[in-house]
Amino acid sequence: MTVIQERVKELVAKYGRSRENLLPILQGVADSERYVSEYSMQVIAEEMGLSAADVYGTATFYSFMEITPRGKYIIRLCKTITCFMKGKNQILLALEDALKIKLGETTPDRMFTLLETNCLGWCHKAPAMLINDDVHVDLTPEKVHEIIRSYKQKANN
Amino acid sequence: MGKNVLKRIDLIFKHEDDCKEILQKTLNRSNDELINELIGSGLKGRGGAGFPTGLKWKLTREAAGDKKYVICNADEGEPGTFKDREILSTVPHKVLTGMAVCGRIIGATEGFIYLRGEYRYLTQTLQPEIDKFHKICDEVGLDFRVKIFLGYGAYICGEESALFESMEGKRGEPRNKPPFPTEFGYLGQPTVINNVETLAHTWTIFKYGAKKFRDLGVQDSRGSKLFSISGDTPIPGIYELELGMTVEEFVEDFGDGDTKAVQVGGASGFCVPRKKFRDIAIGYQGKLTGISLPTGGSMMLFNSSRSMYNVLHNYLEFFCEESCGQCTPCRVGTQQLLHGIRAVKRGEKPASYLDTLFALSETMKATSKCGLGQSVANSFQSIVENFREEMIY
């Protein structure tokens, strides 16, 4: 049995085989593998008695469901109106500078992926970004460099 | 600026931890009595649509079904709104109490909080609160359990029928209505789905009585409301205010002295230009009269340094990405509006092309399947009408 098959079996045992558990199961795979591959989708489909197309259709609908390999830390910078007004583009430049990658890319050491996202719900403390589940607000270019440094240190320890 | 014209209300975030007493006291009353109290309070849905909450509970209670559900809609995705996050961080027990009382009234033993993926970190504090609340339910003899269901980055899932589809393990594509959730909701069963803030208000109503709530606000727009205030303001944040205020009063309190427009209700809401501040109020009856605008609480201020073209461009990019793609008017319409305003700005199309786009937005309003496609016209038309020169030059 492959690692994915084991993981999927474990998740299906935890949540159940019925379709309303598909999203939690996809999220479970995304959590451990950092993304959901087409192979994972096929395994999930088999385990749950669904068509692979159904699983693919559901998985690809949700913008947080990564379907290509991502870094350990996924950065999602808010680009919606208030963050845009409060200097989101300068924050993006600072992130690109600190990580030496462009928007949409992953660092060669697979540590960081840099993405943009829609409104994070922190407009009163804009600009804001998520790094995995953690929120960072009131960003400045200086603060961005500090934050990235602290994540790099955390990763090295 | 900062004149404090508007009275600040302190009900929702008021520190109150008498959860068990309030739940017990409320459950001691009959279902009919509670529904009448809720209807009498005049509480309307705080997610923005403004459906009377008491009536929703009553209809779901009367609907036939094998099982019924209570769902708290915490998929707070409208640009410029962040109040629900604060409620779930600070007073989740008020929301849970509202859900449990609703469950008893309609005959549901299962409830869900559909939490947007962007707020996933909240589960760390919310889950222990839910566990604590389950113990309280057991102590007062109520069979009721709440689970968190995590969304995963899809604005459209805040639309109630798309939310059900998502919970059923499908793409979050809205259903045709009717049937409405009161009859055919999650798994096809009668379902009450309420916004986080709406449920928190039911705590106030059950604890203090309908009158305390009803005494706030104006006719047809009763009670207080949380406003998420951002943009060009010296004091951004979350404020509880009475419904019925004019935009002018709002701007006096929250503007920076140079406010040229206020977006009421987020990207799917309306843009109010300075010359109309005095004429427009914030409430519910506006859907009929056009004088007062409903809102889920998103209030974004823009001063004269902002280009309204950039604002509209940002909204349209948002809608292009968040349209579920299911129906043609919305999928194609959002893209054409975006391409269209770019072409006019670059001079590739004449200014009169804005009128063609205007007509397209009307078509989207009339023919889109759900609220997303239907409401793109709100911001598009109100910005193009009032700031036409900024779209062209």
Image (cartoon, coloured by chain):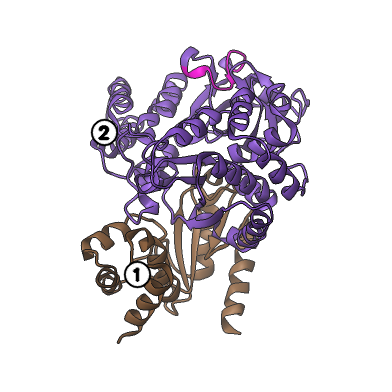
Chain colours: A brown, B purple
Secondary structure state at the residue bearing disc 2: helix
Q: Identify the residue at image location x=26%, y=33%.
A: B329
**Mark linked to residue B329:** 2
- Res B8 quadrant in image: top right
Most common secondary structure along the magenta stretch: loop
Q: Where's residue B61, x and y in %?
A: 48, 36
Q: Is residue B5 visible?
A: yes
Q: Identify the residue at image location x=62%, y=48%.
A: B96
Question: Which class describes the residues within 10 Å of circle 1: few (<14), some (14-19), or many (20+)?
Answer: many
**Mark linked to residue A36:** 1
Q: Which of B107 and B95 is in front in this view?
A: B107
Q: Would residue B235 appear left or right of B50 to someone viewing this image?
A: right
Report the chain holding disc 1: A
Secondary structure state at the residue bearing disc 1: loop
Q: In which quarter of the image is the N terminus of chain A?
A: bottom left
Q: Where's residue A102, x and y in %?
A: 42, 64
Q: Nearer the viewer, residue B172 or B300?
A: B172
Q: Identify the residue at image location x=74%, y=24%.
A: B6
Q: Is residue A76 magenta?
A: no
In this picture, is A148 found above or below B310?
below
Q: Quadrant of the C terminus of chain A?
A: bottom right
Q: Where's residue B152, x and y in %?
A: 43, 56
* Amino acid on which disc 2 is placed: Pro
Residue closest to the far bottom: A1
In this picture, is A73 found above or below B104?
below
What's drawn in magenta, residue-wise?
A: B277-287
Q: Is residue B284 magenta?
A: yes
Report the chain holding disc 2: B
Question: Which class describes the residues within 10 Å of circle 2: few (<14), some (14-19), or many (20+)?
Answer: many
Q: Is residue B256 visible?
A: no
